[in-house]
Image (spheres, rainbow, N blue to C red):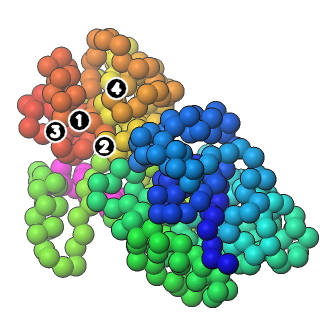
């Protein structure tokens, strides 16, 4: 019998877009999440994810091709069950697989024999076998009636206008060719090219390399900023010049730090996994250290500009981790706000895409002594506040305004 029904575990930034896309491509989709309030909103057609407008969600609901639920038993007749849950790190930067284990536990007792389990959640090589498969087998009594386990790490870039589920190539890997073929057919039906690698570990590893590569290069250009300043050279001009080379170079730009669920998190999974195998990754370790130090450098520049006057009001402009989205996960605005508040400054924030943020006070017209343009800052906001106060630009996008000071000239 041909696969027709898909289960998606976790209806956040990865799971909801996948579920709705699959439903639009002709699959029947059951979306499971433990968050009752969120599921209730989804059932009413209210999306909490930027990439899935509520109108699109309502169309999926009205066609009866997508059903959100908090009841695991409703997954009992899905053919393919896909885990799309967060894989954060702890405060000490150790992998936190509690969501993955919880998801595997929730589905273990309800999936029908012959179902194939897929993991999209980013994690270290071996997670599929050592955590998900092991958990499910222990709960099911080692019956082995789950047909197979496949790793298919997500490749989601929220609000990317060019790449989405339909055209972003996918990498999948498993130990059972027949079950890998089923999963290949599913992802191919959404539109993208699907590459099958030799094992789930190879697929899991590929995702960590993708984001570690980005972190290393972003940390590298951030490390160059003080050197360029000491030379009296515009680093952004230099990077643009280097980027004219049509081969062997990829452009990365400095900033106040990286954010989002992937780039600042995934390299820790890779380093942790390597250390467990007795392998050191000094380049990646160094890149992580550089990235973690950037927000502190920004704060040091703020303190100098305010001459250490801790009764000053600081406005953070653009607190999401990238422009055009509402997602503040791992945003560099978080450690910057925390450190400024620890030092005694009053910190406010403004970002038209973000509804609420617990790390500082929302701006309500207070007098501001310094504005700080962060990753999701918009030119109109910077120009508006530049009429009132000095602005420290940590992005390199707002240099046209004479009242703007570049962080990279520090």
Where residue 312 sits: x, y (%)?
A: 34, 16
Where residue 227 sits: x, y (%)?
A: 22, 56
Other-residue count near label 2 (Cα within 10 Å), few / some / many at <14 / 14–19 / ≥20? some
Question: Between 223 and 372, which is closer to the camera in this rendering?
Answer: 372
Question: Between 185 and 194, which is closer to the camera in this rendering?
Answer: 185
Other-residue count near label 3 (Cα within 10 Å), few / some / many at <14 / 14–19 / ≥20? many
Marks 1 and 3 sit apart, C-alpha to C-alpha, by 9 Å
- The answer to whether residue 223 of the structure is visible from this angle is no
The kind of secondary structure element at disc 2 is loop
**Quadrant, the C terminus:** top left
Other-residue count near label 1 (Cα within 10 Å), few / some / many at <14 / 14–19 / ≥20? some
- Residue beneath disc 3: 398
Q: Which one is earlier in the sequence, the residue at label 4 or at label 2? A: 2
Mark 3 touches mark 2? (CB < 8 Å):
no
Marks 4 and 3 sit apart, C-alpha to C-alpha, by 16 Å
| In this rendering, position of residue 233 left or right of residue 187 | left
Where residue 273 sits: x, y (%)?
A: 62, 70
Residue name at image x 40 percent, y 70 percent: 191
Q: Which span of residues is magenta-colored?
A: 218-231
Q: Which one is earlier in the sequence, the residue at label 1 or at label 2? A: 2
Marks 3 and 2 sit apart, C-alpha to C-alpha, by 14 Å
Q: In the image, which disc is placed on residue 323?
A: 2
Mark 1 touches mark 2? (CB < 8 Å):
yes
Q: Give the dominant element type of the magenta stretch: helix, strand or loop.
A: helix
Mark 1 touches mark 3? (CB < 8 Å):
no
- Residue beneath disc 1: 378
Marks 4 and 2 sit apart, C-alpha to C-alpha, by 13 Å
Q: In the image, which disc is placed on residue 95?
A: none
Marks 1 and 2 sit apart, C-alpha to C-alpha, by 8 Å
């Amino acid at each position: 019998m041909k696969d027709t029904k898909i289960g998606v575990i976790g209806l956040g930034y990865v799971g909801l877009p996948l579920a709705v896309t699959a439903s639009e491509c002709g699959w029947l989709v059951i979306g499971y999440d433990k968050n009752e309030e969120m599921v209730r909103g989804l059932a009413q057609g209210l999306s909490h994810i930027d990439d899935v407008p509520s109108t699109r969600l309502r169309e999926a609901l009205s066609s009866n091709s997508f059903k959100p639920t908090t009841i695991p038993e409703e997954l009992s007749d899905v053919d393919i069950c896909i885990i799309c849950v967060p894989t954060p790190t702890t405060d000490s930067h150790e992998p936190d697989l509690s969501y993955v284990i919880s998801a595997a536990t929730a589905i273990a007792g309800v999936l029908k024999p012959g179902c194939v389990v897929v993991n999209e959640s980013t994690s270290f090589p071996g997670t599929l076998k050592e955590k998900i498969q092991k958990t499910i087998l222990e709960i099911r009594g080692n019956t082995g009636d789950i047909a197979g386990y496949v790793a298919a790490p997500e490749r989601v870039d929220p609000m990317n206008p060019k790449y989405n589920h339909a055209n972003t190539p996918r990498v999948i890997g498993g130990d059972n060719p027949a079950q890998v073929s089923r999963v290949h057919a599913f992802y191919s039906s959404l539109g993208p090219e699907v590459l099958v690698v030799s094992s789930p570990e190879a697929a899991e590893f590929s995702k960590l390399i993708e984001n570690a590569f980005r972190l290393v290069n972003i940390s590298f250009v951030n490390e160059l900023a003080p050197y360029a300043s000491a030379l009296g050279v515009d680093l952004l001009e230099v990077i643009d010049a280097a980027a004219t080379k049509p081969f062997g170079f990829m452009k990365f730009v400095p900033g106040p730090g990286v954010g989002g669920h992937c780039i600042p998190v995934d390299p820790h999974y890779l380093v942790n996994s390597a250390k467990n195998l007795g392998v050191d990754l000094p380049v990646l370790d160094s890149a992580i250290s550089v990235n973690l130090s950037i927000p502190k450098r920004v704060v040091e520049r703020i303190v100098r500009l305010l001459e250490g006057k801790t009764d000053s009001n600081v406005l953070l402009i653009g607190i999401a981790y990238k422009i055009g989205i509402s997602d503040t996960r791992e945003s560099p605005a978080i450690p910057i706000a925390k450190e400024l508040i620890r030092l005694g400054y009053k910190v406010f924030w403004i970002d038209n895409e973000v509804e609420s943020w617990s790390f500082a006070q929302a701006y309500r017209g207070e007098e501001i002594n310094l504005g700080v343009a962060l990753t999701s800052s918009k030119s109109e906001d910077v120009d508006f506040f530049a009429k009132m106060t000095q602005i420290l630009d940590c992005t390199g996008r707002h240099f046209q305004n004479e009242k703007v000071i570049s962080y990279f000239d520090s």
